[in-house]
Image (cartoon, rainbow, N blue to C red):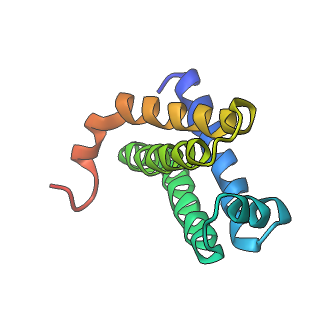
Amino acid sequence: MTILLVIMQSLLALMFLMAGLGKISGSKMHVDGFKHWGLPQCFRVVTGIVELVGAAALIVGYWESSWVALGALILGITGIGGIITHIRVKDSFKQTFMILLLAIIGIVLFAINASDLADFPGFN
């Protein structure tokens, strides 16, 4: 594993840990965001759980590399959903940039580690 991949993995895990915890705990920013996007608050909690699962998979990936691909896939898809949400309500590029960046990192990490999914427990 190169240092750049570890940095990307760590950044993605940290950002989604913070975002997921914020969504689950009901931080004002996330509550207001889901209202702005016209999404129910229960979806905020579900999204937070998905983000925490993806981040946890990336953390497990430090010891079991096949988990990096799974976590990156979960977070990349979540990021794409976030981008679509921002586009749907015509948010600015500034408002969309962070989730766009995180989605790209997730997709790149997945693409680099996709072959490791063959070693994922239960996928054989």
Q: Nearer the viewer, residue 124 or 101?
A: 101
Q: Residue at x 20, y 56 (%)?
A: 123
**Residue 116, how many percent across, how many down?**
29, 39
**Residue 47, how many percent across, how many down?**
56, 64
**Residue 46, how many percent across, how many down?**
55, 71
- Tally of numbered discs: 0
Can residue 72 be spotted in the picture?
yes
**Residue 31, how many percent across, how many down?**
76, 67
Taking the view exactly as shown, the residue that stands out farthest to the left is 124
Residue 12 picture quarter: top right
Q: Is residue 34 above or below residue 2?
A: below
Q: Residue at x 44, y 47 (%)?
A: 77
Taking the view exactly as shown, the residue that stands out farthest to the bottom is 42
Can residue 22 be spotted in the picture?
no
Q: Is residue 99 left or right of residue 84?
A: right
Q: Nearer the viewer, residue 33 or 19?
A: 33
Q: Residue at x 39, y 36 (%)?
A: 110
Q: Is residue 5 left or right of residue 89?
A: left
Q: Quadrant of the C terminus?
A: bottom left
Q: Residue at x 51, y 22 (%)?
A: 2
Residue 113 picture quarter: top left
Q: Is residue 61 above or below residue 41?
A: above
